[in-house]
Image (spheres, helix red, strand yellow):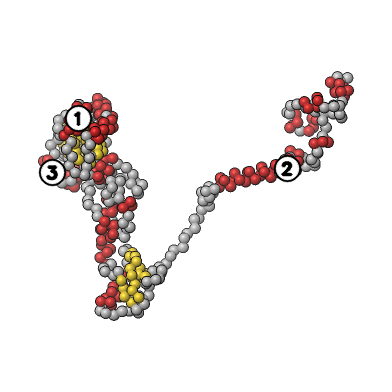
Amino acid sequence: MDMPTNYKPFGIVEIKFKGSRKEFYLNHENIYLEAGELVVVEAATGGYDVGHVSITGELVRMQMVKRRVKEVDVVKKIYRRATPADVDKWKMAKDLEWETMHKSRTLALELNLSMKLSDVDYQGDKTKATFYYTAEGRVDFRELIKKMAETFRIRIEMRQIGMRQEASRLGGIGSCGRELCCSTWLTDFKTVSTSAARYQNLSLNTLKLAGQCGKLKCCLNYELDSYMDALKHIPDNVNVLKTERGDARLQKTDIFKKLMWFSYPREESWIPLPINRVKEIQQMNRDGVVPADLGEHVEIETKPVKAPDYENVVGQDSLTRLDERRNKKKNKNRNKNNKPGGGSDNPQRQGPNATQVPREQRPQGPRPPDGANAGAGNQNRNKRFRPNRNNQNRPNGPGNNPDRNNQQDNPQ
């Protein structure tokens, strides 16, 4: 879209660095920048740093209003687009971060410091490194800074962060299956209490309510306002309703359906009541009137389970479908071996009028040449002749007549 001729672009750009760190910089030279480009910017303590362009134009103005940053407070400048030399030096600095973090952890353990180094961020010109750590209290790391400065030969800056800031820098996958909110779009961390879980009728299970940072999940506050608006119509202090049948105790409350379930002692069934009936009985108990019963309860319609309208052609319902096929093959082979004669029951191989001949009645002589049995089929043509070596040691029999063998060897 073409902009007006007298339009002047907004002179501040938001730059994103490692983790979720974002800062505003002045584009005093009016360089045309697009989101995702690498730029060289001014560092706070001298030198320069390299970052990605996050947003430009009027969106930056809206972001500054949201974060309560004034235009007068933005003083750092954008130098230029990153050149190949700047990118190579920036990548070399980033490759040192993993080794530097492990060496610094070893130094902290040698000094017995109660702190956890979670991340290291090198500046783009390799002259400074910022170490992020978490600790329960204040830590005297002056000796640690001296040793790290001697080891790495750079300027050291230590910055303490909280558990949630650590999770936002490291990132990860939440229990919902999506990337953590704090590492993608959530910038301000509000306090979360267990009362948010109570208002939403969630079980107070710390394993399910806590996130990767060890604190309560930030998403507990997302729908809290809707629940608070719905709770305005729910009566308070109705744990027990007195009736002539007995004291009915509250078991469950459906906030959005405006239903409350009560049960009598030594009974397993729960009776659902609308909130208007609950308020009526509560007012009667305050006036000293005890009703005979809770009254007509609401009949909850249970929708029948809809059967799938597709056919399971893959067989995913059966976990032992492969075992059944294997067992069928084993049983089939076992039945073949158990038949009398040990032969195959395939009629194509034996013929329609084939009969089993005992081994004692079979001829023991050599097999005739292939030309004699030309009409027996293609199977006998390709078979090779193998003489029976056992007949050489047997006495002269019907198949071992020497005169007959000589006549076959010397045909006239």
Q: Quadrant of residue 8?
A: top left
Residue type of the residue flagged with mark 1: Lys
Q: In this view, does 395 lie above or below 247?
A: above
- Where residue 165 sits: x, y (%)? 24, 43
- Write down the residue under mark 1: 147
Left or right: 246 as drawn, with respect to 345: left
Check whether the beta carbons of the residues at disc 3 and disc 1 lie within 8 A of each other: no
Q: In this view, does 259 lie above or below 315?
A: below
Residue lying at 78% horizontally and 42% vertically, measured from the top left: 352
The residue at which mark 3 appears reads as 70
Q: Indicate the position of residue 239 as horizontal and vertical percent values.
A: 30, 69
Give the Cα distance between marks 3 and 2: 93 Å
State the image quarter where residue 6 is shown: top left
**Quadrant in which the C terminus is drawn:** top right
Task: Assign a secondary structure to mark 2.
Answer: loop
> For the residue marked with disc 2, what is the amino acid?
Asp
Q: Nearer the viewer, mark 3 or mark 1?
A: 1
Q: Name the amino acid type tagged 3.
A: Lys
Mark 2 or mark 1, whichever is nearer to me = 1
